Amino acid sequence: MDLNFEDIFQFQTTAGDAILSLVIAFCCGLIISYIYRITYKGAGYPETFLYSLITLAMVTTIVIMVIGNNLARAFGLVGAMSIIRFRTAVKDAQDIMFIFYALAIGMTCGVRLYGVAISATLVIGVLLIILTRTNIFIRKKRSYLLQFTYRSEIEERTPVYTSILRKYCKYNKLINIKSMDEEGQTEVSFYVDLKDPRKSNEFIQNLKEIKGLNRVNLYLEDENMYNT
């Protein structure tokens, strides 16, 4: 017997069906929240967002069950939801993706396609974890932090070290200048991207040869690589 797509929404919801749908939506929401927690790469994942993902999946399930195949209810719900103003800005594209993730699973639970809901939750979750762990779309970082000190009196309109930075670096960005109060010493910090990382020692040695310039340090991802 063939089943039309419209027939999916032709059902009578009992209390038992509603509870079962909510339980499965809750379990799927837990999995989605856990996947978000282990794939999030920020400084600290927002705990309230994890709870919101679980609740979102369950609320969406209730909404779909209430609407069913009733067009009037659907338009009524749209009208009721239109008075709500969401003022919280979503800062990360990943958060938007997880919101739609939870919405889709909640909708699937609402129409009682439990197998699809559970399978989709697991398959999408596993793929997200694999993509996060492999970092196949993230370019490897080569930025270094260069720090050195020099005597203030040697500073010119175009400092001597500028030509060396241009010779060995694809780009350089000045990020900090600090007075050391030690015989006119000034500490300078740059972000640099070396043209050839194999010439790091040569780069450092050329900087060290500049009169009045010392304490040259080159860091990569918070690790001290060279110190002369």
Image: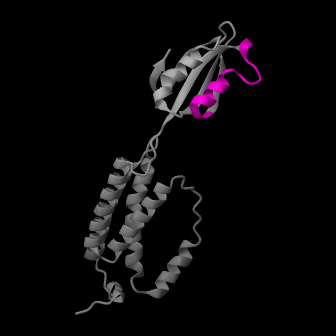
Q: Position of residue 58 (x, y in %)?
A: 37, 66
Q: In the picture provided, is 12 more to the left or to the right than 51? A: left
Quadrant hosting residue 108: bottom left
State which quadrant residue 98 falls in: bottom left
Left or right of residue 193, residue 50 in this image: left
Q: Residue furthest top?
A: 183
Vertical placement of 166 versus 227: above or below? below
Using the image as rendered, state which of residue 228 and residue 9 is in the foreground: 228
Expressed as whole percent of the image width and height from the top left, the position of residue 11 reads 31, 85
**Displayed quadrant of residue 203:** top right
Nearest to the observer: residue 112 or residue 136: 136
Segment colored magenta: 153-172
- State the scheme by which the image is colored: one colour
Task: Reply yes or no: does residue 14 show up in magenta.
Answer: no
Instruction: From the viewer's side, name the closer residue of 216 and 45.
Output: 216
Asked whether 161 falls inside the magenta stretch, the response is yes
Q: Residue furthest bottom?
A: 1
What count of labels does the image hold?
A: 0
Q: For the N terminus, which image quadrant? A: bottom left
Q: At 32% across and 66% down in the image, what residue appears?
A: 25
Q: Position of residue 176 (x, y in %)?
A: 64, 26
State the residue at coordinates (49%, 25%): 200
- In the depicted structure, whether residue 79 falls above or below residue 156: below
Vertical placement of residue 132 versus 13, above or below: above
Farthest right residue?
157
Which residue is found at the position 59% from the left and 64% from the top?
85
| Along the line of sight, the residue nearer the viewer: 47 or 117 | 117
Task: Please provide percent x and percent y for residue 52.
Answer: 43, 57
The residue at the point 37 percent across, 59 percent down is 54
Against 10, residue 198 (above or below) is above
